[in-house]
Image: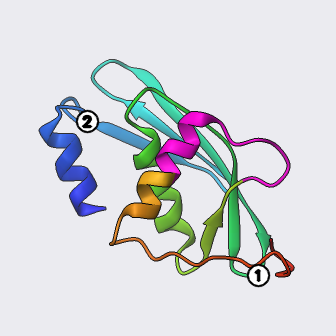
Amino acid sequence: MKSLIKKLLRENMLNGGLALIKTKDYLVLFDLSNEKIIGVVTYEKVGEGLFHVPAIASERGYGYLLYGIVMTLVYPNYIITDRDSSTSEAATSVLRKMYQDPNIEHVSLDETDENY
């Protein structure tokens, strides 16, 4: 998370500051300088040690941050892709980057796993 925040600072994406509004099952990322919402994500528990993200919407560049915040909030549990609908190309791209990040722990589920 620390490296992600540094990257966002370098790219001037945290210039005016961000606020995170959290409820039981969703987060809102708010840009303080422009006074607008730049991202929303919902998450819910779907199994023993597993959460999924049924909905996420953000301005370009903030999806990784939102997924990272959700992972931090549900830790030591894991997040999985939504099983009820198709995952968007943008979300797939963000998740692919996270999967390639050596700082993020990955666990593969077998098709026979009850949580698959």
Secondary structure category for the residue under label 2: loop
* 108 and 105: which is toward the camera: 108
Q: Which residue is mark 1?
A: 48
Bounds of the magenta segment: 82-95
Disc number placed over residue 12 in the picture, else none: none
Q: Position of residue 87 (x, y in %)?
A: 69, 42
Q: Position of residue 79 (x, y in %)?
A: 62, 65
Task: Indicate yes or no whether the magenta region holds residue 85.
Answer: yes
Placement of 22 over or under 105, stated as above or below? above
Q: Residue at coordinates 81% horizontally, 75% vertically from top-left?
A: 111
Q: Residue at coordinates 42% horizontally, 32% vertically from top-left?
A: 30
Scheme of colours in the image: rainbow
**Label 1: how many Cα within 10 Å (few below 14, some 14–19, many 20+):** few
Q: Residue at coordinates 32% horizontally, 18% vertically from top-left?
A: 34
Q: Position of residue 100 (x, y in %)?
A: 40, 62
Placement of 19 over or under 34, stated as above or below? below
Q: Is residue 85 left or right of residue 61?
A: right
Q: Position of residue 26 (x, y in %)?
A: 63, 48
Three-letter amino acid code of the residue under disc 1: Glu
Q: Which residue is mark 2?
A: 17
* 24 and 62: which is toward the camera: 62
**First in sequence: mark 2 vs mark 1:** 2
Q: Which quadrant of the figure contains the N terminus?
A: bottom left
Q: Residue at coordinates 24% horizontally, 62% vertically from top-left?
A: 2
Q: How many marks?
A: 2
